[in-house]
Amino acid sequence: MKGHMHKLIRIISTAEDQEAAAESAYAFADDLVERGDFDYYLVNSERHEESGYTYSLAEAAGKLLVAEALKENRAAFDRAIRVTRFMLAHYSDEQIYQDTYAEQPEDVYLSRHQFGIVGGYTNDCYIYGDDSIWGEKIQNDNDYGLASQDIADGQLWVTSLDMHH
C-alpha cells in the first residue's frame, strides 16, 4: 500500500448538545486509534480546517459534511472497483496473488489492497457512526439510512477529525 496519509473523517454521534457530541466523537476516535484502524488524530489541523468542528444534522452544514463523506466513500469504491476490474482483465490469478505486475499504469495503483477497499475491509472510509448509533464504518447510503433511522436530526451530530493511517 502507498505511504501513510491523513484523511478528514466524519463521526456521527447522538447527543443532547454540541459539547457532548464532540466528546463522544473524540472518545470514538480514541477507540479507532486503540484498535489500530488509525495511528492518531488531530483536533486542530493545519491540513484540514474543519477538523475538530461539530455540527448538528439539523443544520445545512452538518448535512453537507455527511453528504461529502458519503461522496468520498463512493469515489474510493469507484476507484478501487475500476482498478480491480483492470487487474482481473489484464493479469493472471497468480500475478494478482503474488501482487506482481509487469507494468504499473501511471493512473492506477495495482495491488491486492484494492480488493480490500471494494470489500470494505480497509480504512478507506470517510464516515463512521459512534457507538451510540452504529459503532463502525458507514460505508454507503444504505448504512447511513439504517444508522440514522428513527433518530431526529436534532439529536444527530457530525464531527470532523483529521485522522492519520
Image (cartoon, helix red, strand yellow):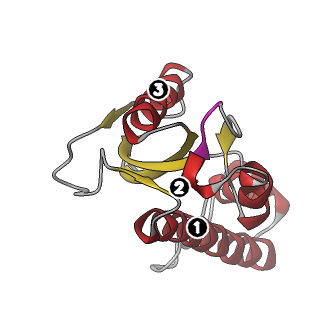
Q: Secondary structure at mark 2?
A: loop
Asked if the stretch drawn in magenta spans residue 53, the answer is no
The residue under the point 76% across, 56% down is 143
Q: Which mark is residue 33?
A: 3
Q: Nearer the viewer, residue 12 or 77?
A: 12
- Report which residue position mark 2 lands on: 126
Name which of mark 1 and mark 2 comes first in the sequence.
Answer: 1
Q: Is residue 41 left or right of residue 79?
A: left
Q: Residue flagged by tag 2: what amino acid is it? A: Tyr
Residue 133 position (above or below residue 138): above
Mark 3 crowd level (few <14, some 14–19, many ≥20, 10 Å Cα): some
Q: Position of residue 101 (x, y in %)?
A: 62, 65
Mark 2 crowd level (few <14, some 14–19, many ≥20, 10 Å Cα): many
Q: Nearer the viewer, residue 90 or 70?
A: 70
Q: Secondary structure at mark 1?
A: helix
Mark 1 crowd level (few <14, some 14–19, many ≥20, 10 Å Cα): some
In the rendered structure, which segment of residues is drawn in magenta?
Answer: 125-131
- Report which residue position mark 1 lands on: 76
Q: Position of residue 158 (x, y in %)?
A: 48, 51
Residue 123 position (above or below residue 130): below
Q: CA distance from mark 1 to mark 2?
A: 9 Å
The residue under the point 22% across, 57% down is 49
